[in-house]
Amino acid sequence: MIYFLIIYFLIFSFIAWRNLPSAFAILIALLPAYLVRFYIWAFPTTLLEGMIVIIIGTWFIQTGFKQVVKRHRKEIPYQKFPFQNQIILIMLTSIISIFIAPDFYKALGLWRAYFLEPILIFLIFIQVITNKKDFKKILYALGISALAISTFAIYQKITGKFIPEPMWRPEEVRRVTSFYTSPNAVGLFLAPITMIYLGWLKDKGNILSTLWKIFILIISLTVIFFTVSEGTWTGLIVAILVFLFFYLSQKIKNKNCVKKITITAIVLVLLIIILNPFYFNSTQEKFNQVIQSKSAQNRLILWQGSWDFLNKNSKNFVFGAGIFGFPKIQDAFRDPLQIEAHIYPHNIFLNFWLDLGLFGAIAFIWIIFSFLKKSYQLIKKYKSPLVIGLASSMITILVHGLIDVPYFKNDLAVLFWVIVGLLIIKGLLLKEEKLSIKS
């Protein structure tokens, strides 16, 4: 194993030195590689983290050090990076949270994996990916990662093998997990990529590129269906509706017509539900089943326990529990006979509040708001389907995040910042394209 890792990192270092965009593409194609874990002396690390460190080190040697020197000599002016204030706030709150956490070394390791490395990757990413060719390379890499996850999941669906939980193995109730330990993890990874590819599908391309996009969409949606993850389904449905609204808004020139179509569709759906007792009853029955399910009840307990902790005193309210502090505080309200131990409260906003404190949660909301505002501005100005897809991918994260953990995992943290980076880069490419057309 160790010899394989050494050879792989040497090859990856060579690729990164020669062509950093290609190294980024490999990194993104292999996001699930965090599951390959090993130790360097006494320090735990992963294959994904090794690649991240190589990219950061290579960029700093080739470019970063020179930039620091030139800025110190005032040869180049200082320029703000995108979302600078939000990122500074989230870094400050996350650093403070390391010292509040019940386990300093555990918190330090997670801080490195969830905040330091993904944010550094984002800052380098938006400087390295500067043209259409490299941008498409990253989109293809996202598709490759989705294909790898989906292929193994389909094998599980067909055979029932390598599914970690016995209750998910029977054919009549089978749920796929791919390389992960739960079906939800598959949906959390695939749903944002699906929306990006839906937007990319609407961009002009050759026949092979179009077939690739359709193939990734079909296989990803199939696997999302096989997960039986209602959180993923809900997030994806909401995101698709958002995508269709903005996409059709661009296609239909008469804005009043778009509003009328939207209102009419909503009214028709409501009338069908109201006038069809069977549909209404079955929907209500399904809703009651979901609310009364063990999973839903467990989440309600997690949320109530989290809220009680935050409201216990002003210190908890402002600073939270520290990074990875939730496993300790849930012991105060968890009945071991009723609910299994969890490491997160299964709500993205509570998660940030507990781990990074009130101002960390505000920083996260600020980033999301800025991302969606930037998306809307680009959609309005350039009418780009891919930008609509990127915005919709964030919608899946937010909606699914109301009942799950779409950020606090090595691959998902990097994916989140890659999506933010893709929006920034796409905006710059659209601006350059428009200027070249004018000239």
Image (spheres, rainbow, N blue to C red):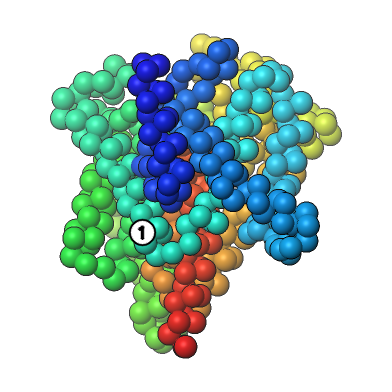
Horizontal arrangement in the rendering, residue 84 relative to residue 269 (left or right): right
Quadrant the N terminus occupies: top left
Q: Which residue matches tag 1?
A: 136
Residue 417 percent across, percent down from the top left: 53, 48
Toward the viewer: 81 or 191?
81
Any part of residue 304 in sight = no
Toward the viewer: 334 or 124?
124
Horizontal arrangement in the rendering, residue 83 relative to residue 213 (left or right): right
Residue 350 percent across, percent down from the top left: 63, 38
Any part of residue 299 in sight = yes
Query: Is residue 361 depicted above or below 373 in this figure?
Result: above
The residue tagged with tag 1: helix, strand or loop?
Answer: helix
Q: Residue furthest left?
A: 158
Residue type, label 1: Lys
Q: Residues within 10 Å of mark 1 (few under 14, many from 20)?
A: some
Residue 199 percent across, percent down from the top left: 36, 63
* Residue occupying the point 26% across, 57% down: 213
* Residue occupying the point 63% across, 54% down: 367
